[in-house]
Image (spheres, helix red, strand yellow):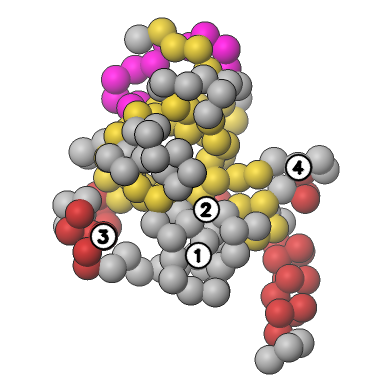
Amino acid sequence: MLKQTKYLGETEIDEDKIITFSQGLPGFPDEREFAILDLPGNEVFHVLQSLNIPEIAFIITNPYHFRKDYSFNLDHNFLDSMSIEKPEDVAVFVIVTIREPFSKSTLNLKAPIIVHAEKKEGKQFILNTDQYATKTPITSQDMNEQSSEGESGC
């Protein structure tokens, strides 16, 4: 299907790229159909594009490209609601806020987007922990500075 997109203009979207968010996304409860689109020439970042409103799109990435130690547990209710039975069922993405210079960009590690890869269903899971922030620096150097600042108050 041919759709207008925020970052890629008019683009052909394959059915296998469409993800259904039955409850929408926080702040966008009525937006339930999105596509994960590749950015030409970039294997790290993707676009999570609303299929209904071209202006609603997010840059996303696999958080493990930037944080190999990123780890969290999905509760049983969440796993059941998405029919997740094994780790292979899941693809994890986080929303990226791109800034200039790029080293000032951030990752939302507090609210990963969980996609059931086979069923093409997604949900944003808000972590009930202060271990991760909504604006985690994308670069390790900034992450280390943030960590040491946080430790000084402990």
Q: Residue at x 57, y 54 (%)?
A: 108
Look at the numbered discs 1 and 3 and tell me whether their residues touch, using CB distance below 8 Å.
no
From the viewer's side, name the closer residue of 36 and 153: 153
Q: Which residue in the structure is indicated by mark 1?
A: 70
State left or right for residue 133 relative to residue 17.
right
State left or right for residue 88 relative to residue 72.
left
Q: CA distance from mark 2 to mark 1?
A: 7 Å
In the image, what residue type sits under mark 4? Arg
Look at the numbered discs 4 and 2 and tell me whether their residues touch, using CB distance below 8 Å.
no
Q: Judging from the image, what secondary structure is the residue with disc 3 in?
A: helix
Q: CA distance from mark 4 to mark 2?
A: 17 Å
Q: Which residue in the structure is indicated by mark 2?
A: 63
In the image, what residue type sits under mark 1? Tyr
Q: Judging from the image, what secondary structure is the residue with disc 1 in?
A: loop
Quadrant of the frame with the C terminus:
bottom right
Q: Which residues are magenta?
A: 8-18
In the image, what residue type sits under mark 3? Phe
Q: Which residue in the structure is indicated by mark 4?
A: 99
The quarter of the picture where residue 148 lies is bottom right
Which circle's residue, 3 or 4, is located before the other in the chain? 3
Look at the numbered discs 2 and 1 and tell me whether their residues touch, using CB distance below 8 Å.
yes
State left or right for residue 23 relative to residue 51.
left
Residue 8 visible, this orientation:
yes
Q: Which residue in the structure is indicated by mark 3?
A: 78
Residue 66 visible, this orientation:
no
Q: Residue at x 60, y 64 (%)?
A: 133
Q: Judging from the image, what secondary structure is the residue with disc 4 in?
A: loop
Q: CA distance from mark 3 to mark 4?
A: 32 Å
